[in-house]
Amino acid sequence: MELTTVWFLLIAVLWTGYFVLEGFDFGVGILLPVLSRDETDRRTVLATIGPVWDGNEVWLLVAGGATFAAFPEWYATLFSGFYLPLFLILVALILRGVALEYRNKSDSARGWDRTLFFGSLLPAFLWGVAFANIVRGVPLDARHEYTGTLFTLLNPYALLGGLATLTLFALHGALFLALRTDGDLRACSAALAVKLAVAALAVGGAFLVLTQLTTGKPATWASAGLAAAGIAGALLATLRGRDGWAFAANALAVVAVTVTLFGNLWPNVMPALDPAHSLTVDNASSTPYTLTVMTWVAVVFTPVVLAYQGWTYWVFRRRLTRPAPQTPPARTPAADVA
């Protein structure tokens, strides 16, 4: 297998890991104002992602770095043509991180909660818009430079892709909360997950069918079907109270959606409306020497990173219980005399 193919697959794996792990972070942030009745609920909800959210974002950093090093032409065209949407995603992620770190240190927690909500909703939607455009194809000239505008990216197909990722990540967050909490918070999360699963099946199913009919390949029909089966499985498992199976099924759906998108993309990395101007794994890649060095670095450090993140999830695997309201201690006669 050529190194260009290896790195295309590795980048696809990195994006898959990012969407699976950061997806439920986005979902938790989106559902924070929906599921939280009071400050205690809000603290419990945020505590579910507190130890892991920053580690999940590492997948995005590595995916971007790998794209820059392995396919510099792809990186240059993507970040110049999609500059405004990616800038909005970056700003949203920064504000979201600040909100997660500082809401408990501020007197205006509600303001940080709104920041967290929009900082989660915007990337969840815009990542779908971006990848829908990448798979569909964008206007590129002979120098592989983007010639469209922002409104070119906001086409109906891309907006449907944004709604698909938004509903899928919201479902992922609801299932994660059902898995990590108990009591009323767990029950409300599971009930909301049922409604979101129906929405994700409808919106995501429409997006995947349209993708397969327009740019799909025969082999990716299987992964598209697996995505729908994963969401349906999450719905059935939730109705039966099997939170772990429900979350695993939806994680499989996220994986299948990402596989479908990257499978339809191959061997292109940035399709153009004029196929002659498309970027492929061959004309967008770095030199063989660069890819060789990168491969050895990945072989050495990737297992270490995966082991550390797996250990983190194992340590923080237990459900969180809503703290019981504290009552002031009863006053004693001796205390009254004193």
Image (cartoon, helix red, strand yellow):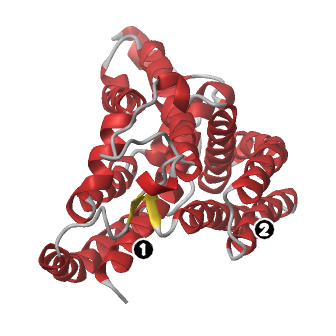
Rendered view: 249 above or below 209:
below
Mark 1 near mark 2, Cβ–Cβ under 8 Å? no
Q: Quadrant of residue 295?
A: bottom left
Q: Quadrant of residue 13?
A: bottom left
Residue 103, percent from left and from top? 37, 24
Rendered view: 142 above or below 318:
above
Residue designated by label 2: 225
Residue designated by label 1: 9
Residue 236, percent from left and from top? 86, 62
Q: Nearer the viewer, residue 178 or 87?
A: 87
Identify which residue is drawn at 27% across, 62% down: 66
User: How dense is the environment of label 2, judged by Cα within 10 Å: few (below 14), some, or many (20 and up)?
Assistant: some
Identify which residue is drawn at 42% across, 52% down: 277
Instruction: From the viewer's perspective, tell me whether residue 259 is left or right of residue 190.
Output: left
Instruction: From the viewer's perspective, tell me whether residue 230 is left or right of residue 279.
Output: right
Nearer-N-terminus badge (1/2): 1
* Residue type, label 1: Leu
User: In which quadrant is the N terminus drawn?
Assistant: bottom left
User: How dense is the environment of label 1, judged by Cα within 10 Å: few (below 14), some, or many (20 and up)?
Assistant: some
